[in-house]
Image (cartoon, helix red, strand yellow):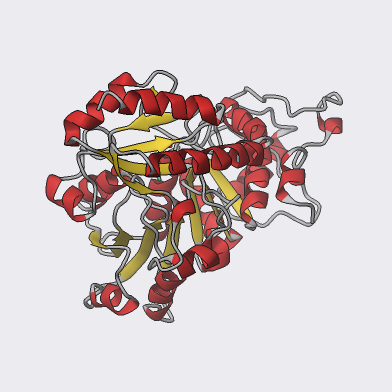
Amino acid sequence: MPDPQSDAVQLGWDPEDGLDALKVPLFQTSTFVFESSEAAERLFSIVYGGEKPGSGEEVGFIYTRMDHPNLVITERRLAAWDGAESALLFSSGTAAIFTTFLTHLRPGDLILHGAPLYGGTNTMLQKVLGPLGFEIGSFGPEASQEEIEDMIDGRRLGAVYLETPANPSNDVFDIDLASRVARAASTPEHRPLTIVDNTFLGPYAQRPLDHGADLAVYSATKFFGGHDDLVAGVVTGPLQLIDPMKTMRYRIGTTGDPHTAWLLGRSLETYPLRVERQTANARVVSDFLEGHPKVERVRYLGAIDDDDRVAELAKRQWSSAGSMICFDVSGGKAGAFAFLDALRLVANATSLGGTRSIACHPWTTTHSNVDVETRRSIGITDSMIRLSVGVETPEDIIADLDQALARV
Ligand SMILES: *Cc1c(COP(=O)(O)O)cnc(C)c1O
């Protein structure tokens, strides 16, 4: 098997299928012409009726909400990156996460999640899945297997859901520990899932399926897309879990569209190049921040000491530190605002993982939906800045941060 990087520039496309075009064409169409009515009947008996295609039988496309060529090509490349049997592309990371819960869990099930989480996911759990009848519980990064298991309290565990590293604080969770909780709660009739949101590190640095996760979910809007010009989501995992999600996806219409799938397939070709550059930049930026008198605390995965609680996990679970940095500036919210408003090269915006460096104030933006008590308890502060380091020249990023910190 070629390396994912070699796969990512050619997998899934044969020039003979499209007028010898070297690159993947954009199949911007909502529907596909049937060879014959009989062929259409056969197609629907497979897609709707669940009949198995014969060996060598080609299953054509029907309608773009169900499946389309750009989707299939990009999904093969995504699966290769995660070392997964299969991958699915969605209209957003949020759609990917929601479709995962809707497919594999049912109301009454308990979702135990690590905290913090991306603000939008937290809101989905509290404001949508909770009212639909799902039970929701959360645990912090230091919780032991026993402490997490105690939270089940006789209920049917549907999933252990982790974001590691977590947005925005870079807190890390042990995927293997979470999967042990899920396995211990299994019965012959029911197997809880371990689901990991791997948006922050991505498969270049961390492959959750290798550490016991059943499914990995991504906001492809971030590092996979990488240019802040698309919104998409991804789930990777074994066919047995992905297949029913594909059915759910067309039933509720959370499918990724052709143009986005095409853009994403193209972006994947440079995914590791961008990440390598961003990671190298982040290391230099983190060192600069560590030494700055107006910076109070820097949390970066590349700056974990040997005596840190998570030093062992750092060796076991990821191979590269990524480019997300979280730090506090002095002067609380006013200090954070003064800093952000003075930035010139680095954009003051939400989102992350793109070529351009972006900083934001989670307390008043991405995590303002999370109630204040929860924010405090999970370590989000009003002086916290989340920085996504881009591909610019590191000296220029540092010069911009330096002049902005001077305004704090
Ligand atoms: C952005 C983000 C999401 C949501 O993804 P969208 O593409 O914006 O729907 C989920 N998880 C994490 C960690 C994120 O950063």
Front residue of 137/246: it is 137
For the point 52% across and 28% down, the residue is 395
Q: Quadrant of ligand 1?
A: top left
Q: Position of residue 218 (x, y in %)?
A: 48, 46
Front residue of 183/245: it is 183
Q: Position of residue 41 (x, y in %)?
A: 65, 42
For the point 54% across and 48% down, the residue is 202
Asked if residue 84 is positioned above or below residue 10 in the image, the reply reads below
Asked if residue 407 is positioned above or below residue 244 in the image, the reply reads above
Q: Position of residue 370 (x, y in %)?
A: 20, 44
Front residue of 221/394: it is 394
Count the numbered circles shown.
0
For the point 39% across and 66% down, the residue is 308
Quarter of the figure with the C terminus: top left
In the visual, does 150 lie left or right of 358?
left
Quarter of the figure with the N terminus: bottom right
Front residue of 24/143: it is 143
Q: Position of residue 376 (x, y in %)?
A: 17, 50
In the visual, does 168 lie left or right of 134?
right
Residue that protrudes farthest toward the left in the picture:
373
Is residue 279 visible in the rendered structure shown here? yes
In the visual, does 96 lie left or right of 76?
left
